[in-house]
Amino acid sequence: MSKTKGNFTNKFKILLVMAALAIPVLIAGHGDASARMIQDLPEGEGVRTVRMRCIGCHEADLIISQRLSREGWVKEVDKMIRWGAIVGDDEKPVIVNYLAAHFGPKKESATGTAKNVAAGRGKEIFEARCLLCHELDLTAQQRLSRPGWTREVEKMMRWGAAVTPDEKEPLIDYLFQNYR
């Protein structure tokens, strides 16, 4: 056997051992995350379908924080289907019904309306950057926590939103103060 072939064989064996050792760690980690995500969804008609079709790509906290109207959930599910989610025609209404029943809009609060918060830099950024692609009602329906708005803004920035790093915090502050 040549020296080159022997080195390749040894490297391949090492790679196989490393892969074999990594598999239980990956499986254990995935199982814990899946259990955590599944237990975060409230029980109800349709929860199994949501777990099966939505939780594979999204953590439960993203779904829980959306707070969309029924129409908003229809649009969101349609968007996910356009983006490749595998949802049967009979599953779509089950998913929408569950999401609308458990994660609909919260009641308005005195501090949660745009009228009660002074306009500022965050509002200017929101109007210049966010409203180019999103309708105001979509933003208003989400009612996210501060960490939820942080995740959403960071996701949009990764996806190419024209929000600069120095605009991020004022935008998050504005969204949280006006749409929670």
Image (tube, rainbow, N blue to C red):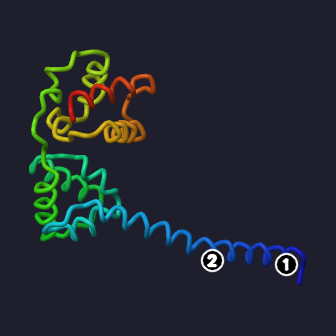
Mark 2 and mark 1: Cα distance apart in space: 21 Å
Q: Position of residue 54 (x, y in %)?
A: 28, 62
Q: As drawn, is 145 to the left or to the right of 89?
A: right
Q: As drawn, is 78 to the left or to the right of 83?
A: left
Reply above or below: 6 against 168.
below
Label 1: element kind: helix
Q: Position of residue 29 (x, y in %)?
A: 49, 66
Q: Which residue is mark 1?
A: 6
Q: Position of residue 40 (x, y in %)?
A: 29, 60
Q: Quadrant of the N terminus?
A: bottom right
Q: Which residue is mark 2?
A: 20
| Residue at 35% from the left image edge and 40% from the top image edge | 147
Between 3 and 126, which is closer to the camera in this rendering? Answer: 126
Q: Position of residue 114 (x, y in %)?
A: 16, 24
- Name the quadrant containing residue 11: bottom right
- Name the quadrant containing residue 140: top left
Reply above or below: 159 against 78.
above
